[in-house]
Image: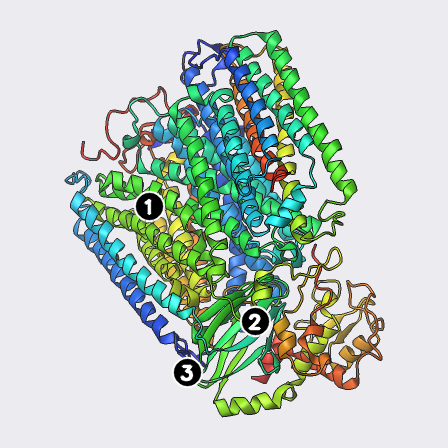
């Protein structure tokens, strides 16, 4: 161990290849950019998290414990905008994707390293604009920016918040572009499409959504901004414009955006499940193609956000039918992961606990999606806490669990050091329990009819809201623990070695932390992915 | 290098046909074809775009993946437009409540308020018709007012 | 490092020039796919409103000057030709003809913007056609006409913004070409900029009939 | 805290039960698959736990029959759910021909409702039991949403167009109605009650008409008529929500409690006491409002204060 520690300090790797602020801010190394993203999105997660905590405290009392309704509205808007656009969407793609895509395909870097750095700067500019909007008075339109509230009636910093989202969208587009080109053109010799780890398939599918969806929300926000500036525009009912058109254009991106969040997590889980059962993935091609299928179908279903919006009921029927189709590839994935455990050699290290937690919570979240794709039940549940519960199960229970699982899995590769596994397992358990306590009551209170985004609610909903707030406090503790031990481990953790989990994949064949060029020489791939047992 | 060097001759031929098509589309606008005016104009535009893409943008000599990228972008555009129009053009199929047709269908019923103020629209006739009481408590007088102004 | 026989032309992450060239090309095409969707949002909204408010849109369209629109289309097509020739010059390593073609393209691009600005937008402003600033049209279907002009200015504005960016990029290329940075081994930048330029041309090819020729002129 | 706690919302309309049956069916599917996945994972994770580091499990590539099975079974289920949900939805969105039409206008942040007989109400909807009611709705400003959970109905109320929803109440009583589409600052105060009455009572109520309105409701109308919202709803003037009974900081640094007297003075002599952070821009309303109307306005401002609501419980 002592020699290994010395090795970590003496050997040149990407972390000690340069020191000082400049070596970070001007780096084009995809691994360092991943670290920059990790730090920034953790910051934005804290911003959104503080808002979440305040929201849950406020809702303990039916009349609102702390804030005026206007302040409450700003809080949930801030929570939504930061969590969706500045944490969830960049989380796995920009952090783990940036770090792993070149390493997994056996390349020295992404195809366009400078563009990659530019993406981070664009992201930060967007983030700063959104922060500006929040600090100087806040924004109260919700993260959905529905017109005409956002164009005409809101008196808050809609412009700078929308501009922030607009700008950060280009970061998302350029990251997706970089990944697609890299996966197409930079694969190591022998790395055929069907030898690629499933994480790459997931990243590829995610990138398709980022490339083809994000521009639409960008132009939509431009139209909103123009309407706000000139007091007339294409969504303005005064000239015959239709606010529902805004919803179409918005959800054309924002529904697939949910899959930008969940698909990469699915990729991570595929990696974790195989590694910790020492087994090939069950039904490789089904999981791979279901990722692409989800990406494509996700663009056909946006109208289910609009069943009661005044959209034509015939369009509602078409969108309902298409929405159910997403259930199929999602189900295929869940069943295949479960089947991978069969006759495996299952160990319960922390990343695996996160992965199993993901499967459970994603199942619950996905199945409640059926209620919302069904026209008759959605009429009752739309815009209630049922919806809030549903998408938190997918985004927090699913995507964040996947992100944390991935961070725990590749942490030794990123930092070269191990974290205390006991603490990590404890945190995983606390998060799982806290999460369910927070969001399960929201399904119930939603079915009772409590509308979302209410600062003040009828007293009969109080019990369930108090339960939810109590769960949230547990969840907050659960998220705080990894923050502490992961930071601790960067300096004091035991040295990991190149492959602490006995995992397969090119990224584990290079030292931890990897050298700047990733590989001494470009590897040649001669086996399938997940060739455990060979 | 793998890339194809295209003879100048081809470029000039394409250039000439693009100019000719521009003239054609402008000329066709002065011929009455009824609804076909739009369709013809769009077909000509598609032809021109195809020529530019195939020759000026070298798509004809590019690897297949470039064509896949372009076609998928067009496919996604088609998804966006077709599913959105599905909504807009089937809304009127819903039975319209009696007495409300005029206001429901005609969007010309809007009052334009002075600049900078959000517009309201004229109260539908049914309100006035059904309100059999004193005008001062009628909803109609409640409505026209300067609303909250944006920004 | 790969054995970099081509010197500084090959970036460190690539194995050879062909891979680098293909990656740049593919990257640009994907970027153009995002541009298709960017303009696509506008086209979707346009399609719907044009069908809902056909008479108003036709009336608005008739306020525009077809001749100037057609001339501008021709200007853009000329610039596309010179751009294509510029790429060709770079491919075969003819510096002087590359410089000429780039300068011509830039000038044609500027001409387009200038015509747009002075002969069209300025005219529209003086006539009182700008929604949100001075829209004073009072004929029948005034609201739909206003909606049409919302689209007209947004679409042509976003397109003109793309032209400005394109001219800027070509300016940088011109400076590099002056220093002799391009050659048969190294012309990716010219080629990808060309793809972008042609794409902006294609957008205009659609905008012209969609905005200027609604309802015919007979 | 447990007061009024329920597991299931009231079923008070003809369509509620049908929606609930579908809801139970979906819940059953959910529970079944959640149980299958959870139990299988627990079983596999325990049964095949790693016993030694050298263990080499048997490698299984996959199984086509299984893949087909778990593609087709969920597909079949969702087809059933789709057909059920859609047919129910179509039935639920077609108002019977004999429906009584009531007009609803949403505006920030109140519901204005007009009965065919001309009677108007604000934030309350009186309807007779066992009669189909069709609401024709529109909005004056932003998108709202008219939802009555006990009836399982909901529809956005959109500016520039009319939307409809219908229901037939099956129980008398008072039921919540909510604005479910986020509509700005006081979104959560834009709620009211649907009061379902016996037909005879309803007739009585109708003939009572506008006289039945409370002071606060009359004040709300005045508030609207006088366009108070142009400033007090936009930040040009101090917001009035929750201000009643609270201390207010004035521009000269002193503090007053916003009681009836203060509010009255502020309406009649606005420049007497200026709230900190605002300009003296409010015109006087002396001579424009009677004392009775002043009381109504104050009652309305009181009703905007959640604290007030708490005390009255």
- Badge 1 vs badge 2, beta-carbon distance below 8 Å: no
Observer able to see residue D34: yes
- Spatial CA span between label 1 and label 2: 64 Å
Q: Residues within 10 Å of mark 1 (few under 14, many from 20)?
A: many
Q: What residue is disc 3 on?
A: D170
* Helix, strand or loop status at disc 1: helix
**For this view, does D164 lie left or right of residue C98?**
left
Q: What residue is disc 1 on?
A: A351
**For this view, does D250 lie left or right of residue D182?**
right
Count of marks, rendered view: 3
The residue most toward the left is: D58
Residue shown at the point (34%, 37%) measured from the top left? A201
Residue B99, which numbered label?
A: 2
Give the chain of mark 1: A
**For this view, does A293 lie left or right of residue B121?**
left
Position of residue A503 measured from the top left corner of the image (x, y, whole percent): 28, 36
Q: Are marks 1 and 3 on the same chain?
A: no
- Badge 1 vs badge 3, beta-carbon distance below 8 Å: no
Observer able to see residue A440: no
**For this view, does A134 lie left or right of residue C129?**
left
Residue shown at the point (57%, 89%) measured from the top left? D205
Q: Residues within 10 Å of mark 2 (few under 14, many from 20)?
A: few
Give the chain of mark 3: D
* Helix, strand or loop status at disc 3: loop
Position of residue A331 measured from the top left corner of the image (x, y, whole percent): 28, 51
Give the chain of mark 2: B
Q: Are marks 1 and 2 on the same chain?
A: no
- Spatial CA span between label 3 and label 2: 28 Å
Along the line of sight, the residue nearer the viewer: C113 or D279: C113
* Helix, strand or loop status at disc 2: loop
Position of residue C21 measured from the top left corner of the image (x, y, whole percent): 45, 19
């Amino acid at each position: 161990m002592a020699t290994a520690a010395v090795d970590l300090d003496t050997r040149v790797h990407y972390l000690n290849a340069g020191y000082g602020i400049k070596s970070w801010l001007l780096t084009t190394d995809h691994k360092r950019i991943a670290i920059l993203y990790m730090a920034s999105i953790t910051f934005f997660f804290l911003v959104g998290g503080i808002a979440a905590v305040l929201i849950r405290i406020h809702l303990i009392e039916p009349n609102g414990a702390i804030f005026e309704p206007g302040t409450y509205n700003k809080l949930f808007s801030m929570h939504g905008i930061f969590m969706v656009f500045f944490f969830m969407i960049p989380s796995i793609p920009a952090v783990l994707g940036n770090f792993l895509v070149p390493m997994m395909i056996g390349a020295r870097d992404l195809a366009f390293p400078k563009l990659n750095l530019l993406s981070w700067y664009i992201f930060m500019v967007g983030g700063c604009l959104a922060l500006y909007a929040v600090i100087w008075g806040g924004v109260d339109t919700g993260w959905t920016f529905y017109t005409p509230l956002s164009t005409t009636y809101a008196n808050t910093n809609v412009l700078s918040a929308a501009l922030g989202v607009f700008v950060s969208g280009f970061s998302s587009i350029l990251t997706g572009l970089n990944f697609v080109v890299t996966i197409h053109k930079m694969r190591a010799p022998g790395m055929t499409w069907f030898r690629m780890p499933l994480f790459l398939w997931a990243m590829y599918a995610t990138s398709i959504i980022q490339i083809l969806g994000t521009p639409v929300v960008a132009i939509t926000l431009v139209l909103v901004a123009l309407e706000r500036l000139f007091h007339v525009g294409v969504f303005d009912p005064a000239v015959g414009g239709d606010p529902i058109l805004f919803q179409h254009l918005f959800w054309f991106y924002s529904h697939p955006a949910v899959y930008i969040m969940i698909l990469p997590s699915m990729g991570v889980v595929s990696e974790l499940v195989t590694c910790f059962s020492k087994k090939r993935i069950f039904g490789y091609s089904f999981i791979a193609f279901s990722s692409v299928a989800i990406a494509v179908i996700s663009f056909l279903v946006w109208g289910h956000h609009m069943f009661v919006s005044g959209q034509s009921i015939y369009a509602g029927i078409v969108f309902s039918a298409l929405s159910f189709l997403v259930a199929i590839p999602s189900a295929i994935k869940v069943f295949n992961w479960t089947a991978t455990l069969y006759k495996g050699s299952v160990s319960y290290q922390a990343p695996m606990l996160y992965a199993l937690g993901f499967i459970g919570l994603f199942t619950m979240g996905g199945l409640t999606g059926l209620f919302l794709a069904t026209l008759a039940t959605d009429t009752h549940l739309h815009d209630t806490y049922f919806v809030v519960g549903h998408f938190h199960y997918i985004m927090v229970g699913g995507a964040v669990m996947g992100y944390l699982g991935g961070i725990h899995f590749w942490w030794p590769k990123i930092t070269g050091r191990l974290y205390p596994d006991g603490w990590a397992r404890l945190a995983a358990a606390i998060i799982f329990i806290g999460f369910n306590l927070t969001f399960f009551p929201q399904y119930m209170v939603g079915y009772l009819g409590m509308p979302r985004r209410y600062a003040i609610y009828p007293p009969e909903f109080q019990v369930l809201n108090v339960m939810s707030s109590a769960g949230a406090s547990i969840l907050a503790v659960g998220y705080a623990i990894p923050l502490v031990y992961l930071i601790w481990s960067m300096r004091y953790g035991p040295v990991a070695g190149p492959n602490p989990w006995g995992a397969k994949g090119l990224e584990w064949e290079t030292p931890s932390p990897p050298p700047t060029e990733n590989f001494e020489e470009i590897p040649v791939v001669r086996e399938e992915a997940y060739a455990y047992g060979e | 290098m793998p890339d194809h060097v295209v003879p100048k001759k081809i470029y000039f031929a394409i250039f000439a046909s693009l100019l000719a098509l521009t003239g054609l589309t402008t000329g066709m606008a002065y011929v009455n074809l009824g609804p076909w005016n739009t369709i013809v104009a769009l077909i000509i535009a598609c032809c021109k775009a195809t020529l530019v893409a195939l020759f000026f943008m070298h798509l004809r000599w590019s690897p297949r993946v470039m064509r896949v990228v372009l076609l998928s972008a067009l496919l996604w555009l088609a998804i966006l437009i077709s599913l959105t129009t599905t909504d807009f053009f089937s809304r009127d199929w819903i039975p319209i409540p009696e007495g409300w047709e005029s206001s429901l269908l005609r969007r010309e019923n809007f009052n334009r308020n002075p600049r900078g103020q959000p517009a309201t629209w004229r109260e539908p006739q049914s309100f006035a018709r059904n309100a059999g009481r004193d005008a001062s408590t009628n909803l109609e007088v409640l409505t026209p007012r300067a609303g909250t102004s944006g920004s | 490092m790969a054995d970099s026989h081509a010197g500084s032309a090959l970036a460190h992450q690539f194995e050879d020039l062909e891979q680098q060239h293909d990656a740049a090309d593919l990257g640009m095409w994907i970027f153009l796919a995002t541009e298709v969707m960017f303009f696509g949002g506008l086209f979707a909204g346009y399609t719907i409103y044009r069908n809902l408010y056909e008479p108003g849109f036709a009336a608005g369209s008739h306020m525009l000057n077809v001749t100037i629109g057609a001339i501008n289309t021709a200007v853009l097509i000329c610039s596309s030709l010179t751009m294509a020739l510029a790429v060709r010059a770079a491919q075969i390593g003819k510096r002087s003809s590359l410089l000429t073609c780039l300068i011509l393209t830039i000038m044609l691009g500027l001409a387009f913007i200038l015509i747009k600005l002075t002969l069209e937008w300025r005219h529209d402003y003086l006539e009182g056609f700008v929604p949100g600033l001075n829209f004073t049209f009072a004929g029948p279907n005034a609201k739909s006409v206003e909606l049409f002009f919302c689209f007209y200015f947004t679409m042509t504005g976003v397109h003109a913004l793309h032209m400005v960016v394109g001219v800027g990029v070509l300016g940088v290329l011109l400076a590099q070409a002056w220093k002799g940075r391009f050659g048969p081994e190294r012309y990716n930048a010219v080629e990808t900029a060309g793809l972008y330029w042609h794409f902006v041309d294609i957008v205009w090819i659609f905008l012209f009939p969609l905005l200027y020729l609604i309802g015919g002129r007979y | 805290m447990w007061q009024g706690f329920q597991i299931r919302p009231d079923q008070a309309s003809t369509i509620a039960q049908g929606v609930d049956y579908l809801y139970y069916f979906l819940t059953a599917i959910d529970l079944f698959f959640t149980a299958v996945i959870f139990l299988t994972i627990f079983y596999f994770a325990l049964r095949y736990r790693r016993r030694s580091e050298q263990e080499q499990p048997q490698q299984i590539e996959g199984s086509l029959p299984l893949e087909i099975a778990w593609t087709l079974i969920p597909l079949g289920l969702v087809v059933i759910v789709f057909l059920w949900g859609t047919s129910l939805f179509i039935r639920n969105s077609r108002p019977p021909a004999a429906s009584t039409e009531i007009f609803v206008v949403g505006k920030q942040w109140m519901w204005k409702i007009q009965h065919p007989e001309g009677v108007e109400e604000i934030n309350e909807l009186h309807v007779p039991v066992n009669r189909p009611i069709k609401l024709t709705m529109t909005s004056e400003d932003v998108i709202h949403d008219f939802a009555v959970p006990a009836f399982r109905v909901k529809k956005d109320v959109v500016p520039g167009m009319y939307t409809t929803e219908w229901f037939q109440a099956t129980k008398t009583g008072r039921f919540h109605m909510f604005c479910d589409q986020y509509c700005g600052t006081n979104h959560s105060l834009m709620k009211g009650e649907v009061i379902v009455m016996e037909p005879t009572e309803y007739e009585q109520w109708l003939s009572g008409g506008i006289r039945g309105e409370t002071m606060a409701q009359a004040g709300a109308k005045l508030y609207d008529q006088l366009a108070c919202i142009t400033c007090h709803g936009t930040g040009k003037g101090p917001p009035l929500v929750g201000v009643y009974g609270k201390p207010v900081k004035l521009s000269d640094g002193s503090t007053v409690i916003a009681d009836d007297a203060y509010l009255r003075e502020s309406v009649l002599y606005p420049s007497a006491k200026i709230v900190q952070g605002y300009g003296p821009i409010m015109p006087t309303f002396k001579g424009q409002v009677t004392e009775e109307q002043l009381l109504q306005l104050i009652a309305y401002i009181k009703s905007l204060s959640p604290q007030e609501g708490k005390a009255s419980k």
